[in-house]
Image: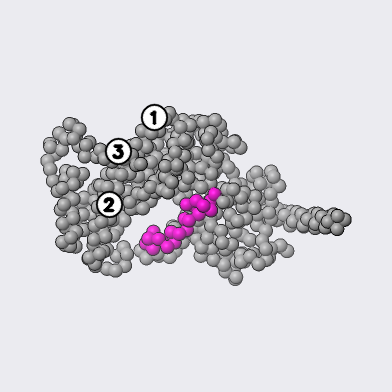
Amino acid sequence: MKKSLAIMILFAMAWSMTLAANSSIAGKCMTCHKEKTTGLYKQWLDSNHALHNVTCYDCHAAERKEPDAFEHEGAWIATLVTPKDCGACHPQQTQEVSESYHATAAEILDSKDAYLAHVAGGNPIAVVGCETCHGSKVQIDPNSPNKLSKLSWPNSGIGRLNPDGSKGSCTACHTRHSFDKAQARQPEACSKCHLGPDHPQKEIYEESKHGNAYYTNIDKMNLDSDKWVVGEDYYIAPTCATCHMSATPNQKFTHDVGQRISWTLRPPISKRQDNWQQKKENMQDVCAACHENQFVENFYYQFDAVVRLYNEKFARPATEIMNLLKKNKRLERQAAFSNKIEWVYWELWHHEGRRTRHGAAMAGPDYAWWHGMYDVAQNFYFDFLPEAQHYNDPEVNAYIEKLLNDNPMHSWINRSTQELKEEIRSGKMQQVYEDLFQEDK
């Protein structure tokens, strides 16, 4: 018993000495950085970290053996603060992020997006234009003062591949060094990456009634509140965080942004997510904080129909034509994107098709139609199909002829305007698309 007590006393003494040493190091950090990097110091000073006595050294301390550790002013530190570091205090959030789609974002480094940036653009633009959002594989340079290679640092990409094996960067959303929760709750936190011709969520949100209500009532959003439950702590409008992460009266907040998404709208042909029924219910629960159930169900009825319309009318036929051309070895050049039709097909789904689907998902009618399906249709009929026929492949030409003559969704192109208007007025045109409104089981 006495031996155990002695061990406990020795442990407490050692721990006290460690705390004292760490406190001394932390004091040196703050004294120096208050002068050398005043802006960063003040961001930290105003943060909840400072309020709870979480210092520079608590986050940046490193073991000597860590690959990115370097000695600085008598202490071993690392420039990078990774999810593994944050997980020491925020284990649940770190676990949820590691299981999310965000954590896989750097896999784009092996995708067609990154390939296109490298070959059609060049390596510098891939570093700045792709890896800055998706995350780089952080490289170690032993000759650099902070041991991080200039090719991969700075980088706060959401799926950054860190030297300690962790994936992601918490500062992608919680901007250093304030880590302000109010900032992370606002749509601007997401708009660094979620904007532009291929995924214009920022622009769609700003167009939507949700965005309109938010931007004209920001002062009523209670963004600084510790508790932030939609319908209880705020009710004016949702933000990106509201729908994809934050708490509802029935759900806890989550850092896994995929738990409320029932469709995968990114690929050429939209797909249902695993466990999509539950994920759909999760999102509908968010909607129900401000909308009655019939409103929510009807919205999904229309949204799902647009996704199926895009899939069946344009995405599947275009993909089948591309597969036939590749199978029959009709493309002139071997390198991906070295043939015009590959660019036309790419923009059909990667730009125009995504705008359609995201516009429908986020209640942005202009993006669903004029920036979306309108461009899809024009591209498909007057760019993609003529370019496919250019190869004069019998199998492809037969497929296109059957599509335009026998498929009621496409045969309009060979008929008269008057006849088509009559079918629109009579409701016959609507019957062509009735199957698209059938709910998945």
Is 439 covered by the magenta stretch? no
Residue range (magenta): 96-116
Q: Which mark is residue 316?
A: 2
First of labels 1, 3 by sequence position: 1
Kind of residue at badge 2: Arg
Q: Residue 78: which numbered mark, if any?
A: none
Please give the residue where the numbered disc 1 appears in the rendered image: 294
- 180 left or right, relative to 276: right
The colouring scheme, among rainbow, by chain, secondary structure or one colour, is one colour
Q: Is residue 197 visible?
A: no
Residue that appears at 15% across and 53% down? 401
Q: Is residue 389 above or below residue 301?
A: below
Question: Across the whole image, how many numbered discs are drawn on residues?
Answer: 3
How would you classify the magenta stretch by its main secondary structure? helix
Q: Is residue 98 magenta?
A: yes
As helix, strand or loop, the secondary structure at mark 3 comes to helix
Q: Report the residue that reaches farthest toward the front.
A: 1
Q: Quadrant of residue 17?
A: bottom right
- Whether label 1 touches label 3, CB < 8 Å: no
Point out residue 96 in the picture as x, y percentages from the top left corner: 54, 49
Which quadrant: the N terminus? bottom right
